[in-house]
Amino acid sequence: MDRPVADRIADARAAFSRRAWSAADEAYRAAGPDAPLDAADLERAAIAAFLIGRDDDAVAAWGRAYQAALEADDPIGAARRAFWVGMVLVQRGELAVGGGWLGRAARILDETGIDCVERGFILIPQGLGQLGTGDPAAAYESFSRAAEIAQRFGDPDLAALGRLGRGRALIDLSEIARGVGLLDEAMVAVTTGEVSPIIVGTVYCASIEAFQGIYDLRRAQQWTEALTAWCASQPDLVPYRGRCLAYRAELMRLHGAWQEAIVEAGKAREWLSRPPPEPALGEAIYQQAELHRLRGDFSEADGAYREANRWGRAPEPGLALLRLAEGRTDAALVIIRRALDEAKGAMTRAGLLEPCVDIAIAAGDLTTARSAVDELARIAVGAAVPLLGAMAAHAEGVLLLVEGDAQAALGPLRRAAATWREHGAPYEIARVRVSIGAALRQLGDEETAALEFDEARRVFRELGARPDLARLDAATGDQPAPGTPDHGLSGREVEVLRLVAAGLTNRAIAADLGISERTVDRHVSNIFTKLDVSSRAAATAFAVEAGVR
């Protein structure tokens, strides 16, 4: 027997209050389209629908709430509901219709002439638009006015959005410390339960994106974990879960968990592709492209960069680095130069400058490389962000190497390695170790250089960074021996294995090859690891079977 409509509405309100979004949505829909819902109930129905990913239902409910507010002679309530219709539509890419609803909200407020908190909310999309068009100073003013209105009316949601907006604007103005301070304040309001669920998700996602944009990995990881826990506490929550997975994928990649990152990026792509697809889908696909490129799956990377671009995520610098890895250096240089010409904001440029150094050096354009190094160094000093400093130091060291000053290169390279080590980024550490090894080799210290190369080689092999491994082997003369593609031994290791199989001791092998006994010990250890053997007899048996003579 059907329950009375009033009971279903009571069920919906109770579910909403305990944040059981699916249950609230189901109860409101079960009440029927003709249920006597007031504007407040319709707004609750809209919020529940939005939080479980039913955007069309949410827009419809907010639209009905708007109409109900007008009929109740509540123009301020109508303006608030019109604002939310507009924001949802704009966020899903329906700019014209969404802008129309935002304009309607502004018109209603202008006609009433009433001083109210809704006037502050209308400033939020204005500030976002100014950020998007590269005018952070104007955006800061808009968000500051919103914050002032929030303070006057004691509205925690608007206050959080005002801090968030001002923080992001200050970052774009290169006032990193002040910007991060405001983002931290906004996050405190989120974690203490001061703001509503939609604002919670918005602040989480925008702040994490900002922290990643300024290479503040510790904050990004801390708040990504908090967002993950918040999403897990509401299993039916949809809008923020996909972004959370995309952020996690990027952090996993940086921390060397590439296989896990691939899985996480795939999950993010799946979540964000649910109708209607979210704009963050492009970022999830870009993360997949980066992992394909780093692992040497160039065809898959090319396709993913193209698809990410279709979803509004610029394919740089990854696409330029892909062209470099493919040997298309001229194309890579054109792409990275054009991206820098279009880039707005110091942090956006910083993410392009280090790749520009590598590409320009490969193209023999040391003038462009020096310009990029100097600009990156200026940004790093102004931002005072450790990882930016590491990027700038590595770029400086690499260029000094090319310019022939290996001794001067060692200082910045070692600083870069130390910083990446503190942040647990094995791939970046390995890249720097390759450069340190090259500097040591230029200085005649072959023994220590080999140690750096071997450690970098180990990391590249564990990560599956095949292009980096191939470049390192080519640079050190350790090319895989012809006819032995499956054992993974370098050319030098094959020479050592051949002599082991001939019955020579490590001391005799060292004398035969003109290297130190310590180096031979290291090669033998590597051979045992790669062949998964534990004795010289087993290695010899492999050599005989594989035809290594």
Image (cartoon, rainbow, N blue to C red):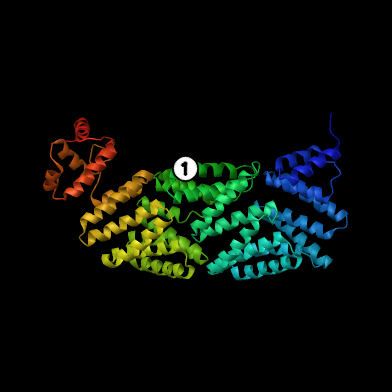
Query: Residue, x 58% and y 65% (percent of image)?
Result: 181
Location of residue 311 in the rendering, given as x and y in whole percent from the top left corner: 56, 50
The quadrant in which residue 16 appears is top right
- Image: 384 above or below 328: below
The quadrant in which residue 498 appears is top left
Location of residue 275 in the rendering, given as x and y in whole percent from the top left corner: 64, 42
Q: Residue furthest top?
A: 1
Location of residue 350 in the rendering, given as x and y in whole percent from the top left corner: 46, 63
Tell which of 260 and 126 is nearer to you.
Answer: 260
Residue 414 in sight here: yes
- Image: 333 above or below 291: below
Query: Residue, x 60% and y 65% (percent of image)?
Result: 182
Q: Residue furthest right?
A: 72
The residue that disc 1 covers is 260
Location of residue 1 in the rendering, given as x and y in whole percent from the top left corner: 84, 28
Which amino acid type corresponds to the residue marked 1 in the rendered image?
Glu
Residue 307 in sight here: no
Q: Is residue 356 left or right of residue 549?
A: right
Determine the secondary structure under disc 1: helix
